[in-house]
Amino acid sequence: MQTLTSGPPACMAVASAMLLLAAPVGWTAGDTRQQIADRAPPARGSDANRDADTREAATLVSPTVRPLRDALVPRIDAARERFAIPALSLVLVHSDEVLWAEGFGEADPGRGRPASADTVYRAGSLAKPFTALATLRLAVAGRLDIDGPLAAALPGFSIRHRFDGSVPAITPRMLLSHHSGLPSDLHKGLWSDTPFTTVRTRLRDECLAFPPRQVFGYSNVGYSLLGHMVQRVAAEPFDVHLGRTLFRPLGMSATRIAVRPSAADGLAVGHRHGRALAPLPIRDLPAQGLMTSARDLGRFLKMLLCGGELAGRQVVEPGPIEAMLAPQNQDVALDLDVTTGLGWFLETGRIPGAERLARHGGATLGYAAELMLLPEVGLGVAVLASSGDAQRIVGQLAESVLARSLSLVPEPLPPDLFVPAGDGPDAVGSAVSAKGHFATDLGLVAFEAGEADQDHTLCACMTGERLDMVRGADGWLGVDAMDRDALPPSARTLAAMRYQTRRIGGRDVLVADIGDGEAVIGEKVPAAPVPAAWRARLGHYAVINPDPDYPVSDLRLSLVDGKLCLSYRMPVLSPKRIQMPVQPLDEDTGVILGLGRNRGDALRFVEQGGGSLLRWSGYLARPLGDGDP
């Protein structure tokens, strides 16, 4: 059994002058924000006054970061107004001290309840670092082997695969680093009160999306399996285990894992497109069932930055923390610049002056969250928002706070506190022709070669938009910067990136330069005709086992630019139609093409009730008899 190493519990003291906290500074909702000392104090006794008092007590601003805070507040307010974010809360920590904790806007606009650092939000996938830490602590205790077969620690787990020969056994380490090859999601029942432990048995009828360790594939169901494994090994419910071993020892009194909020949580009201959204139940609790506050996340960050120590007490062993922040995929060629730890994403060079950034985001219905660490300099930040449309905003704010705080840090943490990040893989793959169709996260796209080798056209097949591209001296295809402003908004995402086509690991892929690194965003669609059996099944389908609160509608199998595609709508998630190219493997089985979220999933036609039904991600759908021509 693998043993996780442990290191000394160290947390360097920092200059005391920097870390002395000022008297709390608050604000009242309404017009421009000012220090509370500049305003007439409100009369005591009303609910509004009690809310203001609560928020004032919850706000902390160190004198050292006050200029940073005052510079950022107008931008925070402008972003909240522009993107309809009712409430936003953040915390900034250095080593074992909170430098800034504050809330902005209203947690409940209908009742005028202001947001504070203690406001509770659904934090979605910020649950994953906690699940990872719980798993690794059991490994340190010798109660499970993260490099042994998952089925040994979670009996009854099995899943089909469609690959030639045998595949490696899935291990907990693969789940922790998103390299197990499991599907990203099991959509059926995702937003329901179905127990997350049912994922184990429901996966028996699904197929691996990719061979294990072939490529990064973000998987919520993988983390549900980890939570099930933790629950079984610890012999207590998963939420109880995290509460007993992590939340309570860390003093995270507002934090819990829950299917749905209760009235006692004081949850910020989630919003989507500026409108309040009733919270749906969550099945995959170990993956995205966290509810927490900025202040509580500050305690978690301090513990991580201090090697497991909090308030002078060793709460968590240093070994699991070091293991979480160690790169796991340097030898996975298809991952390019994507580096994963165990429960964290690792990046270098993103923030000037910082060696390494560890981060995780959390996007869920009605909420967005971001958690970031700069381990070598001892800085951490968490941002929570009550809008499902705010993921980009919370990420940019967290990154900006860290970047601007670097000059405030008087000394780094000891270099041996965290394991080194290591070097990423060198540029890999050989160039291949760009001509052809590619299955991407943005739908089906096609490259057409021009008369000269350096000229190409990119066509977004679903919308019909065409972008003229030129190959630069460095070999990348891109839209001329002067032409981008004239493009419609729907085309600007594609136009903002540069492209190369390469063969990596035996697959012809589309690589994008996304500004801060390279990423594989698509895979070439084979130039093969669509079999007659699948042409006969073109048309609309109706899901016969729907989730009432999270419908999948307008399901279609159709030909797009001559390629077979599955498309559908998830109106609670997005108003846009989602389109994914499909490659038939035989008369009854196909696979969604591409590399990434929800790619590699299988489609199968199964006989049930005297008819042929389409099975996909746990859903069953019957044909409506209106086949496309």
Image (spheres, helix red, strand yellow):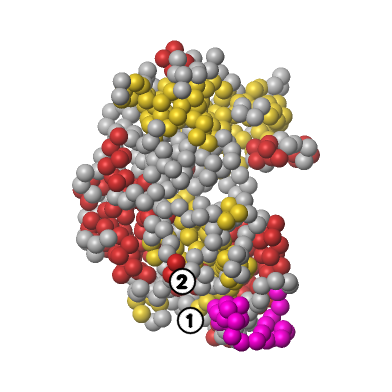
Q: Is residue 21 above or below residue 239?
A: below
Q: Is residue 119 left or right of residue 590?
A: right
| Residue appearing at x 63%, y 54% in the figure | 274
Specify the amino acid type for callout 2. Asp
Query: Few, some or many C-alpha atoms within 10 Å of disc 1 (few <14, some 14-19, many ≥20)?
Result: few
Q: Is residue 491 left or right of residue 186?
A: right
Farthest residue in the top direction? 532
| Residue appearing at x 48%, y 55% in the figure | 279
Labels in figure, total = 2
Real-space CA distance between mark 2 and mark 1, rounded to the nearest whole angstrom? 22 Å
* Disc with the residue nearer the chain's start (2 vs 1): 1
Pick whichever, 231 or 110, lies toward us: 110
Circle 2 is placed at which residue position?
296
Q: Is residue 106 magenta?
A: no
Query: Few, some or many C-alpha atoms within 10 Å of disc 2 (few <14, some 14-19, many ≥20)?
Result: many
Specify the amino acid type for callout 1. Ala
Circle 1 is placed at which residue position?
13
Q: Nearer the viewer, mark 2 or mark 1?
A: 2
| Residue appearing at x 42%, y 53% in the figure | 281
Residue 199: give x, y in percent of width and height. Answer: 32, 45
Pick whichever, 91 or 142, lies toward us: 91
Q: Which mark is residue 493?
A: none
Q: Look at the image and give the residue range highlighted in magenta.
A: 33-59
Is residue 41 visible to the viewer in this orientation of the structure? yes
Residue 305: give x, y in percent of width and height. Answer: 45, 70
Residue 405: give x, y in percent of width and height. Answer: 61, 70
Label 2 residue SS: helix
Is residue 149 visible to the viewer in this orientation of the structure? no
